[in-house]
Image (tube, rainbow, N blue to C red):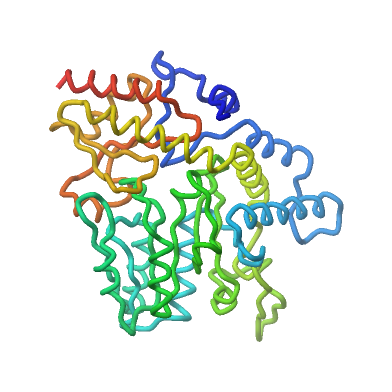
């Protein structure tokens, strides 16, 4: 049984009020709230185990190292990677993609080589490649989409050439909620001998992810979107690829030996983890992954699918409602506009009713240009949201609409 009342009790912030109204938190696409066990893990480690990892012979350092590396194993198991050597800890999806863009372009690309991205990509999967384009002269190709928010697969297949070196695509759109057919897209790329990076920031919190089943070459996600702490994330990479790529940053931990004449680099995954890692954050991330695993990713997915279907039905009843993103396979994100009401006005007034939504371009300005708009209001659901909260959202939208 999916016990929503017990789940909500694990998140103290959900019981607070905003402007005298009960908080209705519908901004999970930006960040999720944290269960008690995650916050307690942070507190407990700082109070009882805090010491720098990997470098100390004393008891606390050994214990902290064991926790940190146990967290790596938790992540490996959660996404079903083959080895912990394939799990690199980063500050989040953005750093994971920047790491790959820098290391991959430096070692695998030259002027004229191509990277394929999609129309719906987050800025963090566009700007790093533009930086490499300016630096190295690589070419960016874009997968178009239809009006429902689905990537055009026939057009995607036509983008490949002998100069294509990498495909980068998000698993789930942070604006449209579209669940892209990444397994099929990866197979197509591999048929051309091209590796694929999957941005999993919006998929890992909502569905079971198996990187071996997807056959993804690289996969990135953030801790804070899956009920973990901010400032920690993961880059998964197949070991044979990570062995080929040069380090992203230099410093302590990522070295084997250093002299003024020559430096040799550490083995995987430490080659990509320069400096002191966020070992407190990795422990808390592992606790968050254990938390959602205990509930069951399939159960979470089913609950959120029911919420999304209900919200789509409920919001479509509102006069003047325009919903962006009605793909056949859609995750728990709904972006909308109502009549001529500016998204910022709608979001600001909903906030006064205690309803937290996101407004703006959602770090996807090229997608907004494709849709012919400046921005949207976005409601995004998590494992603790309820149909009653969706009813409050709908009533709030109707109330704001009447004001205009």
Residue 97 image point, x, y percent: 45, 62
- Asked which quadrant contains residue 194, the reply is bottom left
Q: Looking at the image, which residue is at 55% across and 25% down? A: 8
202 versus 144 height, above or below: above
Q: Nearer the viewer, residue 149 or 336?
A: 149
Going by the image, does 94 lie left or right of 61? left
Going by the image, does 159 lie left or right of 355? left
Q: Looking at the image, which residue is at 67% across and 47% down? A: 283
Residue 205 image point, x, y percent: 50, 44
Identify the residue at the far top of this view.
20
Quarter occupied by the N terminus? top right
Residue 150 image point, x, y percent: 28, 54
Q: Looking at the image, which residue is at 55% across and 43% down? A: 297
**How many marks on residues?**
0
- Asked which quadrant contains residue 266, the reply is bottom right
Quarter occupied by the C terminus? top left
Q: Nearer the viewer, residue 184 or 26?
A: 184
359 versus 162 height, above or below: above
Residue 234 image point, x, y percent: 56, 57
- Asked which quadrant contains residue 335, the reply is top left
Going by the image, does 237 lie left or right of 19? right
Q: Looking at the image, which residue is at 33% across and 85% down? A: 162
């Amino acid at each position: 049984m999916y016990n929503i009342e017990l789940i909500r009790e694990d998140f103290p912030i959900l019981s607070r009020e905003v402007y005298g109204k009960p908080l209705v938190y519908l901004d999970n696409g930006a960040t999720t709230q944290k269960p008690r066990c995650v916050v307690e893990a942070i507190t407990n480690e700082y109070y009882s185990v805090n010491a720098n990892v990997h470098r100390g012979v004393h008891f606390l350092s050994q214990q902290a190292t064991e926790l940190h590396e146990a967290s790596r194993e938790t992540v490996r198991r959660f996404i079903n990677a083959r080895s912990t050597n394939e799990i690199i800890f980063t500050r989040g999806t953005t750093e994971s993609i920047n790491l790959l863009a820098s290391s991959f372009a430096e070692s695998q690309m030259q002027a004229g080589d191509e990277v394929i991205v999609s129309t719906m990509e987050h800025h963090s999967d566009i700007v790093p490649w533009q930086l490499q384009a300016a630096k190295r002269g690589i070419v960016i190709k874009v997968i178009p989409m239809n009006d429902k928010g689905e990537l055009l697969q026939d057009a995607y297949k036509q983008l490949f050439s002998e100069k294509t070196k990498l495909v980068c695509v998000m698993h789930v759109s942070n604006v449209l909620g579209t669940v892209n057919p990444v397994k099929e897209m990866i197979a197509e790329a591999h048929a051309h001998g091209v590796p694929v990076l999957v941005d999993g920031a919006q998929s890992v919190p909502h569905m079971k992810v198996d990187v071996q089943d997807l056959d993804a070459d690289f996969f990135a996600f953030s801790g804070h979107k899956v009920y973990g702490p901010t400032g920690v994330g993961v880059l998964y990479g197949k070991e044979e690829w990570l062995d080929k790529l040069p380090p992203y940053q230099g410093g302590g931990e990522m070295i084997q030996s250093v002299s003024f004449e020559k430096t040799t680099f550490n083995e995987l995954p430490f080659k990509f983890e320069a400096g002191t890692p966020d070992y407190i954050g990795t422990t808390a991330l592992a606790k968050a992954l254990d938390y959602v695993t205990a509930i069951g990713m399939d159960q979470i997915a089913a609950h959120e699918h029911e919420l999304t279907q209900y919200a789509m039905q409920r919001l479509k009843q509102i006069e003047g409602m325009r919903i962006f993103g009605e793909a056949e396979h859609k995750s728990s994100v709904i972006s909308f506009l109502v009549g001529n009401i500016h998204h910022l006005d709608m979001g600001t007034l909903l906030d006064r009713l205690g309803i937290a939504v996101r407004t703006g371009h959602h770090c996807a300005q090229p997608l907004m240009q494709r849709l012919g708009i400046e921005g949207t209001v976005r409601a995004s659901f998590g494992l603790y949201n309820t149909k009653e909260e969706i009813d409050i959202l709908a009533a709030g939208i109707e109330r704001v609409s009447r004001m205009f």
